[in-house]
């Protein structure tokens, strides 16, 4: 059966103490919203609806960046979860499949759990995701027998006996879309908060002879984020789980607790990650590559056998082919380094294409920006770029060409040629000694004058 995803993302997140909408706070370098959308997308929904409220324009822009097919609708007043889901009805007009309700501040629900909910729809008209809580606190309680769910009681409305129950409500619901909206129409707000609770649909469904069921998951999957402290705890949980996964998959990390990973980091088996490496979004490290200590990578691809760092920075668009060496204090941005290229220290390579086996000397800079536009540098294979060369783009250095150390290269260099772009050295014998004596005398005179003034 086809599936529609309804993702609730309207909350302000008062406890975050932030002007940013809660769902746009970042976990593993991606907005919480994206984590929730990715979880739902694993089921390949035919429609996706994001219900926005506080900071709706920002939420809509972020949604469009990650899931341009999703439709964003507005909940102008936050009157409860049932009211929020109801705002998705116009966007799902004519849709006759299942609807899955997720939350933009709950990033850890797994594909396996959502698949289990979808499977449970074969047995129940309404399916709710629950978990056994170590400390139930103020969670809503699920009144169930086996996988049959009788009703959900919000903490504020629960009796002492009901509060003793440890099976808690995650808020995630799956039901036929038509059934869901019909049940929501019957939800009232006669409760302690005066809100329209989505949880009320279970009792309404049972009163109409419909079946309600519960699927259980690990409590860690249902972690909701409502404060900076909870966001920090979620980050720690993500990093610990991701590091453990990589170790299990054959990645070598000598100090994994010092390595920080993004939500989409991919690292192949037998790659080696040294201590204090930070991965931003969009990084792929292939099998057998080595990322040395104190390096920062984002939006880049590192091929087999390549070595990066220590103290290197790969920025978006950096593409390193096999056996490339990028050493200490080298920065690469929007550049392709072909197989066997070496840039071992103190170099900036931006907006460039560099051919096989070319050596880039220390202090080389591709001068790619003129204050208005970016320009590209092209260097052929087997070239040798001398230390402290300034390559003023747009410029091309041919196969097997060389540049002399300290050159400023402003014109194309043909294949096999040597380019020298520096002024002629002038040497004045004995001048350094004379200059040093003159300056020493001037400094002594200044000190004598200062001593006389103070005396």
Image (cartoon, helix red, strand yellow):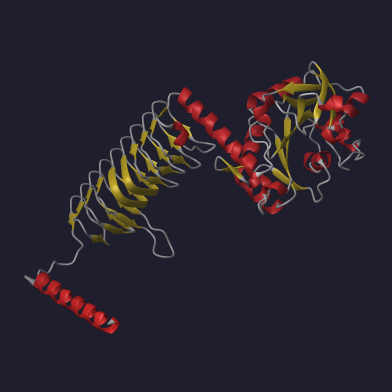
Residue 286 falls left or right of residue 147: left
Residue 240 in the image: state x and y as whole percent.
53, 31
Q: Which quadrant of the rendered structure holds the N terminus?
A: top right
Q: Residue furthest left?
A: 429
Q: Is residue 387 visible?
A: yes
How many numbered marks, from 0 up? 0
Q: Nearer the viewer, residue 216 or 348?
A: 216
Q: Taking 210 as reference, is 230 above or below it?
A: below
Side of 191 where 244 appears, left or right: left
Q: Quadrant of the C terminus?
A: bottom left
Q: Position of residue 174 (x, y in %)?
A: 77, 29
Residue at the location (10% across, 68% down)?
Answer: 427
The foreground one among 128 and 123 is 128
- Residue occupying the point 88% across, 33% down: 183
Compared to residue 294, the image places residue 168 above or below, namely above
331, 64: nearer the viewer? 331
From this viewpoint, is residue 151 visible? no
In this rendering, position of residue 426 left or right of residue 289 = left
> Where 221 sits versus 346, above or below?
above
Residue visible at 72% across and 20% down?
119
Farthest-out residue, top: 146
Looking at the rendering, which quadrant does residue 222 occupy? top right
Q: Position of residue 417 (x, y in %)?
A: 18, 53
User: x and y percent of residue 56 in the render?
Assistant: 71, 51
Q: Quadrant of residue 4?
A: top right
């Amino acid at each position: 059966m086809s599936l529609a995803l309804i993702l609730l993302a309207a909350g302000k997140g008062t406890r975050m103490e932030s002007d940013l909408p809660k769902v746009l706070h970042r976990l593993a370098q991606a907005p919480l919203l994206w984590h929730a959308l990715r979880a739902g997308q694993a089921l390949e929904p035919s429609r996706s609806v994001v219900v926005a409220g506080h900071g709706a324009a920002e939420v809509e822009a972020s949604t469009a960046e990650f899931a341009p097919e999703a439709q964003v609708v507005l909940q102008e007043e936050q009157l409860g979860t049932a009211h929020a889901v109801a705002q998705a009805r116009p966007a799902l007009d004519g849709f006759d499949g299942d609807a899955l309700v997720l939350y933009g501040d709950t990033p850890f629900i797994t594909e396996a759990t959502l698949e289990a909910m979808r499977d449970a729809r074969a047995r129940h008209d309404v399916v709710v995701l629950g978990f056994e809580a170590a400390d139930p606190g103020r969670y809503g309680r699920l009144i169930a027998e086996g996988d049959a769910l009788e009703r959900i009681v919000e903490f504020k409305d629960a009796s002492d006996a009901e509060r003793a129950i440890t099976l808690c409500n995650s808020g995630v619901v799956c039901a036929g879309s038509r059934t869901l909206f019909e049940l929501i129409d019957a939800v009232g707000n006669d409760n302690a908060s005066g809100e329209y609770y989505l949880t009320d649909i279970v009792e309404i469904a049972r009163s109409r002879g419909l079946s309600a069921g519960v699927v259980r998951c690990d409590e860690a999957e249902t972690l909701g984020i409502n404060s900076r402290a909870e966001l920090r705890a979620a980050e720690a949980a993500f990093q610990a789980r991701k590091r453990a996964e990589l170790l299990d998959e054959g990645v070598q990390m000598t100090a994994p607790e010092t390595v920080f990973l993004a939500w989409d980091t991919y690292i192949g088996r037998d790659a080696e990650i040294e201590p204090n490496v930070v991965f931003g979004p969009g990084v792929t490290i292939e099998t057998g590559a080595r990322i040395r200590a104190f390096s920062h990578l984002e939006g880049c691809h590192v091929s087999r056998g390549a070595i990066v760092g220590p103290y290197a920075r790969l920025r978006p668009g950096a593409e390193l082919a096999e056996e490339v060496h990028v050493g200490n204090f080298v920065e690469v941005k929007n550049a392709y380094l072909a197989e066997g290229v070496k840039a071992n220290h103190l170099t900036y390579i931006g907006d460039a294409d560099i051919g096989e086996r070319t050596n880039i000397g220390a202090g080389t800079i591709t001068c790619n920006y003129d204050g208005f536009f970016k320009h590209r540098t092209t260097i052929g294979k087997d070239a040798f770029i001398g230390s402290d060369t300034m390559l003023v783009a747009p410029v091309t250095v041919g196969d097997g060409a060389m540049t002399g150390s300290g050159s400023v290269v402003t014109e194309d260099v043909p294949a096999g040629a040597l380019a020298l772009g520096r002024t002629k050295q002038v040497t004045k014998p004995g001048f350094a000694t004379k200059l040093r004596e003159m300056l020493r005398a001037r400094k002594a005179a200044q000190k004598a004058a200062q001593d006389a003034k103070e005396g």
